[in-house]
Image: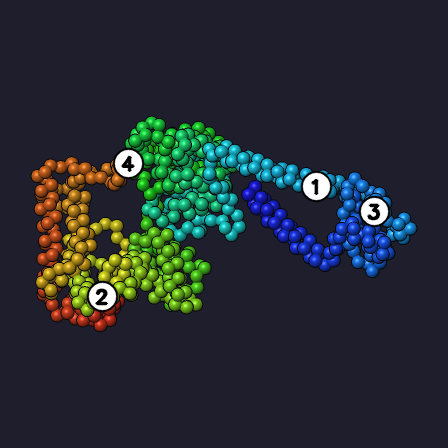
Amino acid sequence: MSRTILKNFLIFLIIFLVIAVLFSTYNATLDKPEVVGIEKIIQQIENGEISQIIVKNNQLDVTLTNNKKQISTKEPSESLSTLLKNYNVNPELIKKVKVEIKNEEGWAFWLTTVLPFLIPLLFIGVFIYFMMRQIQGANTKAMSFGQSQAREIQQKGKGKITFKDVAGCKESKEELTEIVEFLKNPHKFTQLGAKIPKGVLLMGAPGTGKTLLAKAVAGEANVPFLSISGSEFVEMFVGVGASRVRDLFKRAKKSAPCIVFIDEIDAVGRQRGAGLGGSHDEREQTLNQILVEMDGMETKTNVIVMAATNRPDILDPALLRPGRFDRRVILDLPDINDREAILKVHVENKPLAKEVNLRTVAERTPGFSGADLANLLNEAAILAARRNKKTIEQNDILESIEKVLLGPERKSHILSEEEKKITAYHEAGHAMVAHLLPHVDPVQKVSIISRGHAAGYTLKLPEEDRHLHAKSEFIEELAVLLAGFTAEKITFGEVTTGASNDLRQATLLAKKIITEYGMDEDLGPRTLGEREELIFLGKEIHERRDYSEKTAELIDERINMLITQAQETAKRILTKDKKQLEKIVSELLKKETLEREAFEALFPKQNNKE
C-alpha cells in the first residue's frame, strides 16, 4: 500500500514540476521586461521618458511613457531618492515621475521568506513518513509470519458448489451427507450421545475430485470453508509450522460451524521418525501440533477437519486413530456411467454439435479421472477453435482422447519410406494378434502417424469397465506386446529400436504375474519382494528381497518362459496367415490410419473373435 502511495506521489510531483516549468517558460516569453542599468534609468528621467517607477525592495519596475516595461536593481542599503540625489538629477524632473514604493506584507512576505526553507523540510518529512510506513509494514509481516495462510471461502450465489455439481461419487457423497447434517443440526446427534467424527480423510487418485467434494460439503452445509495446503505449514524457520496450525484452529473456532480443509496432508503427515532431523524435524513438530489441536477440540465445537491425499499408506498411524481422521472416504476412478455424468457437467458451457455422443466418449475413456475428462473437453474446444468451428464436433473429442493418451500428432516428423514400412508391419502385428486373441480388448484404431514419442500406435480400449483380470488375459496381453517385435523379425530378419517400450512393458507385466499376483504354479500363491518407501533417498519406492538366490533364479526362469511362450504365440498367429498381415500393412501404407470398422472389415467373418 505504501509503495503505491509513494509511486503516485512521485508521479504527481513530476507532472506538477513539468507543468510549472512549461507555464513559467511560456509566461516569460510572452512579455519579458528589459533589464537595464541605473545609468540608463537616470538618463531616461532626464529625457522625460519615464512615467512611473515602482520600488520593490531592491528592484525597480520602470514604466516608460510609451508603456514599455523595464527592470533595474539598486543597492539594498540606499533609497531611490538618495540614489537620484547622488547622481545630481534635477528635482523638478523627479517630480514628473510617479514613484510608488511597495513592501511585501502578509502571505506574500511569508511565502517568499519561509518557502525556500519549507520545501526542503517538506520533502524530508514526506521521505521519513514513507520510510516509517515501510518499516511498520515489515514489522507487520514479521509478526504475521506465524499466522495461518488459510483462505476462507464463503460460498454464495452462483459460485456455490453443492453435491449436484459433483458428478459420480455416489457412495462418497452418501458418506459425507451425515457431516452436512451434523453441521446443520448438531442437536439431532448429540441428544443420542453420538459424536460426529472430528476428521474426514478423502483418499483417491489424483484428479478424482477430493477438493471439489470438500467444497461441496461446505456448500451443502452453508458454512465457511478454510482451505490450506499441507506444504504451506512448513517453513525454513523452526516453529513456524506449529504456530500456523495453532492460528488455523483458532480461526476455525471463531468461524464455527465451519470446515477446515487441508489439501495434500501427506506433506506434513508422513510417518514420524523417518526423517534425518529426528524429533526436531520441523515437519514432525507441525504434525504433532495438528494432533494436539484435533485432540483439544471440544465436542460442542462444530469444526470438521477434512483432508485429502493420494498416498494414505505413508500417513502417520496417529493421524488415523479414532478421534482424529477416523472417517475415511475413498474416491475411485469413475466408471462408464460416472464418466458420462462428469462429461455432461463439463459441457454445460461448451457449444456441442448435435451428433456428439457423450456415451461413446465415456466408453473410450476408461481409467480417466474427472480432471482428465475436463482436460479432454478443453483440448477438444481448443482443437475446434483452431479449425475455426462454431461448435465442438465428435471427431474433435475423439481426436483429443488420443492427444491426451499419446501426445499431439507430429506431422513434421516425416518417416522415410523404409521406416514407414517397418512401422506399418510393427503396428499391423500388434493389431492382428490383438484382434484374433479372444481375451484382448478390441482394437479401436491403428495408425502409423507419429504421436508423442511413438512412431505409430495401436489403440485398444475395453468395451466395459473391468476390475478383475485373469491369468489368461495377461498371457494374451504379453503376446500382443511382443507381436510388433515378432512381426519385424519375421518380415525383415532383424528388429529395430522401435520395440524397446513394448519389451519393457512385457517384462514388467511378466514380473508382476510371477511376483505380485501369485499366478505361477511352481512358485505358488505368494508375493515375492517387499516394497517399502525410503523418504529421504533418491527413489521413494525401494524393493527389498524376501527370498533366496535360488528363488531369484527361478523367478528369472519363469519370466523368460512367459515371454518366450508369448513370442511363440504371436509368431504362430502372424505366420499362419501372412497374407492377412500384408493386407493390413498395405492399407496402413495407403491410408496411414484405420478406424475400428475399417480394420475389422479386412478380416473374414470366421477369423473374428468368438
Which residue has dot 4 on it? 536
Work out which quarter of the rendered image holds the C terminus and state it: bottom left
Q: Amino acid at mark 4?
A: Phe
Q: Is residue 367 left or right of residue 124?
A: left
Mark 1 or 4: in front is 1
Q: Give the mark toward the camera: 4 or 2.
A: 2
Q: CA distance from mark 4 to mark 2?
A: 44 Å
Dot 1 or dot 4, earlier in sequence? 1
Q: At x 16% / y 36%, what residue is drawn?
A: 546
Does the image show residue 286?
Answer: yes
Looking at the picture, how far across and down is residue 315, in whole percent? Answer: 32, 36
Mark 3 or 1, which is nearer the eye? 3
Q: How far is the residue under mark 1 from the one under mark 4?
A: 68 Å
Measure the alpha-carbon separation of dots 3 and 1: 37 Å
**Residue carrying label 2:** 415
Q: Which residue is mark 3?
A: 87
Say what amino acid the circle numbered 3 marks.
Answer: Tyr
Q: In the drawing, what numbered circle is on residue 115?
A: 1
Answer whether residue 344 is visible to the viewer in this image.
Answer: no
Q: Residue at x 72, y 39 (%)?
A: 114
Q: Quadrant of the N terminus?
A: top right
Question: Which sits earlier in the primary sequence, circle 4 or circle 2?
Answer: 2
x and y percent of residue 351 in the render? Answer: 44, 64
Say which residue appears at 26% left-offset and 50% top-offset: 467
Q: Is residue 524 above or below residue 340?
A: above
Which residue reaches farthest top? 279
* Disc 2 to disc 1, C-alpha distance: 82 Å
Observer-side mark, 3 or 2, equals 3
